[in-house]
Image (tube, rainbow, N blue to C red):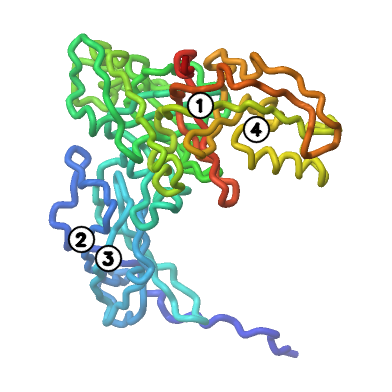
Amino acid sequence: MLLAACAEDPVVPDRGALSGFEVRLVAPVEPGSPAFPLPFTTMPLEVELDIIARDRRGERMRGFDGEVRLTSVPGRIAEAERTVRLVEGRGSARVGLQYTYGDTRIWVQEQAPEGEMSSFGLGISPPLFFAEPRVRNVRFNPDNPAGLSPLFGREARIGEGILMVTNVVANGFYATDVGDALPDWSTGREPRGVGQEPWTSLFVFTFNFPDGITIGDRLCSLAGGVAEFQGQTQLTFPNYIIQGVGRVGEVPDEAFLDPADPGAPGACAYRTEVDGSLVQVLPHVLDEATLGDNTLVRAWDSALVRIEGGVLSTRFDDCDFDGSGQIEGADERACRSRCQRDLTCTEMSSLRQFDQFSASVGGIAFEVADATRAAGYDPLAGCAPHAGVEGDPDDPPGYRCGDAGRQLRSVTGSLRLVDLGGVVLRVVIPRFETDLVFAP
């Protein structure tokens, strides 16, 4: 006895003769090459394809009338352009290819009508070769400057530009591409200061302290996964080549071992006659208008910056009334909120956990982090203990400092923007003792 099925089985069309799709590249006429790649595609590059359905004998399958789906690997094709209809087994497509680099192919896959099972017919275009992205291409999103990196969630290799390490911290390092400001790498033998352009700096997250890398190193290449953390674009699980050192974590191949060949992929890593220490990345001076604008200041995230003037905290409040190490409960949260609204106040848990304290300039709040480790500065020096009233959010215990020694002439360091759900903290991370300069 046959029982009726509880659901309809999908219709499987007679596509057994479909072998796949031939994909011909019509335009661009010059698809680039590894030696002479096309530019990185910030704006869409028009690509024209001729797509032909082929049967198992290799002949055009004129009985195929249906849609195919286009995908770029790597890169992006606008959603409206990703579906193409073939008539009598042939069709053409014009698509805008964007944010792609290296060896790029466009994949074509049959898109079966709803309710039908696909035959999984595939086709792949001839290769197009694009230049690798620079830091600016990773950081700046032309479609939405306030949005995520256009390469978010993808692997990227930055092999273009002149990458200089500007700061090293406990869990990574900061690098800046000065290639636009220093187009000629030859520096002579005298130190040469070079400025920075917006959107050309990046934080590289290494989880632990990055051994073997120091401020002033030149990176011949840098690769990793593009991620966003609290509004900051980062490169994670990185692999990098340091000039004069070679590839971290890998044994270089033969191409990397020939310093006499200026065209070798790893030539930069073995050209010790080019002294990276002679190039000094100059801090970008952030004016108050840029520092106070959440949109403008994003262009300088991860850059080496200098803020001129300002005053450090003169009040340190300990809002952890029960000593748990956490700010919990209504009174503790009220205490922290009151302190955060006060430009002269630092809540002690920030100092204990992150070596971070508050400062301000022109009514704009910013934070100074890692000053004790990097600059040997004690923010509580010259401050007196304040007993306060335990449990009182308006008068908690802590420290009170006079104005003497709290006025800044300037503070220099890497800028980190921390987006806490719309509230954007500005954090400056000094490198040396000389990065904190106090007014007389």
Left or right: 217 in relation to 49:
right
**Disc nearest the viewer among 3 and 2:** 3
Kind of residue indicated by mark 3:
Val
Q: Amino acid at mark 1?
A: Ile
| Precedes in sequence: disc 4 or disc 3 | 3
Disc 1, SS: strand
N-terminal label among 3 and 2: 2
Q: Nearer the viewer, residue 354 or 435?
A: 435
Q: Is residue 401 visible?
A: yes
Image side of residue 328 versus residue 136, left or right:
right
- Marks 2/4: CA–CA distance: 63 Å
Let me know if residue 237 appears in the view: no
Depth check, front residue: 366 or 193: 366
Q: What label does residue 354 carry, if any?
A: none
Label at residue 429 = 1
State the separation of the CA atoms marked 2 and 1: 50 Å
From the top left corner, tell me how far across and down residue 440 is, in percent.
Answer: 47, 14
Residue at the disc numbered 3: 95
Per the image, the residue denoted by label 2 is 25
Question: How far apart, in angstroms, are the residues tagged by discs 3 and 2?
Answer: 12 Å
Q: Could you tell me the amino acid type at mark 2?
A: Leu
Q: Position of residue 146 (x, y in %)?
A: 43, 52
Measured along the vertical axis of the image, is residue 31 above or below residue 332? below
> Who's the residue at 23% across and 65% down the image?
49
Residue placed most toward the observer, 419 or 204: 419
Gap in angstroms between the C-alphas marked 4 and 3: 55 Å
Label 3's element? strand
- Badge 2 density bin: few <14, some 14–19, many ≥20, Cα 10 Å: some
- Residue mark closest to the camera, 4 vs 1: 4
Quadrant in the picture for residue 23: bottom left
